[in-house]
Amino acid sequence: MNYDHAFHAGNHADVLKHLVLVAVLEALARKPAPYFVLDTHAGQGRYQLQAEAAQRSGEARDGIERLQARLGKLSTLAPALAAYMAAIASELSLGAYPGSPLLIAKALRPQDHLACCEIKPDTAHTLKKNLARDARIAVHQRDGYEAIKALLPPAQKRGLVLIDPPYEAQLAEFDTVLGALSTGLARWPQGIFAVWYPIKQRRDVMPFLRAAEGLPCKSSFTVELRSQAEDSPLRLTGSGMLLINPPWQLDQVLEAALPQLAEALFGRQDFWLLQPLRQEFPA
Ligand SMILES: C[S@@+](CC[C@H](N)C(=O)[O-])C[C@H]1O[C@@H](n2cnc3c(N)ncnc32)[C@H](O)[C@@H]1O
């Protein structure tokens, strides 16, 4: 396993993923009942933007750093974008970018819980150090897909499963994700499931999305951000989030933010796409 998220932290894919994550967490916090989050592929939690990996790849420069510089010139931000920038502000001010476990930990209320899984021992160790000791948070050095079987359903009735694999297995990872979603939905039908996926050539993603349409859930949609119009077999040309059982009106919240996000990152208001996969019809 060679993947190291330090090269990619704060890139445009992280920005999309974490914008959606923060919006879901905000929606969950609207009700007082406790929620549970399972972060199946957690990473190390905090990434230094001046570290060699980040500097060598330059991905954060074209991602969060460009976004921060350009949004600073705008007088009004869409609420989801404002919430995302507020959630990452304290880490950015220290020259770091927060990973999903830190963002979730920051959003937890006293009654909420988080379980993070990270398979690499060193990365899991760093994650434990990066998360302050907190009885509401558990870090497991284990396979996140296995944890879907072991940790679901949680005692809490509501919550989120974030699935953010490195796709080292390339297209085969899509089948693993679909299997995990089937298992997860069978164990926790009302859970929100959010899956990040890479886009190189969009046609490669289509079988995954068609299969996801058939998953048993109330509703689902995808939201994608493209960094360029042309596909490439070699490099990331965009990324998406698949949302299953999304919070009410999450699609509208994101639709309001995406043109501003795409304009700031790529100079193109139209480099995004939100598509329903499965819609809830009134009974
Ligand atoms: C894309 S990174 C995660 C980034 C993180 N979710 C964030 O948003 O900050 C993927 C991580 O999953 C880890 N990983 C790979 N396979 C895994 C598995 N089967 N179970 C748990 N973690 C895994 C990798 O070591 C890597 O740290």
Image (cartoon, rainbow, N blue to C red):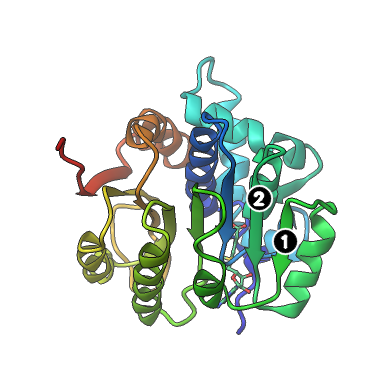
Horizontal and vertical percent position of residue 90: 76, 36
Name the quadrant of the C terminus. top left
Residue behind mark 2: 113
The quarter of the image that holds ligand 1 is bottom right
Q: Reading the chain from its start, which is encountered first: label 1 or label 2? A: 2
Looking at the image, is 183 positioned above or below residue 59?
below
Whether residue 240 is visible, yes or no, is: yes
Q: Nearer the viewer, residue 101 or 58?
A: 101
Q: Residue at x 62, y 82 (%)?
A: 2
Looking at the image, is 57 positioned above or below residue 96?
below
Which three-letter amino acid code belongs to the residue tagged 1?
Ala
Horizontal and vertical percent position of residue 145: 51, 74
Q: In screen coordinates, is 9 left or right of 228?
A: right
Q: Residue at x 28, y 54 (%)?
A: 217
Residue behind mark 1: 138
Horizontal and vertical percent position of residue 212: 26, 63
Local crowd at mark 1 within 10 Å, few (<14), some, or many (≥20)?
A: some
Q: CA distance from mark 1 to mark 2?
A: 8 Å
Q: Residue at x 52, y 29 (%)?
A: 30
SS at mark 1?
Answer: strand
Give the number of marks.
2
Image quadrant of residue 201? bottom left
Name the quadrant of the N terminus. bottom right
Q: In screen coordinates, is 145 left or right of 186?
A: right
Image quadrant of residue 47? bottom right
The reply to whether callout 1 and callout 2 are in contact (CB within 8 Å) is yes
Whether residue 70 is visible, yes or no, is: no
Looking at the image, is 30 positioned above or below residue 61?
above
SS at mark 2?
Answer: strand
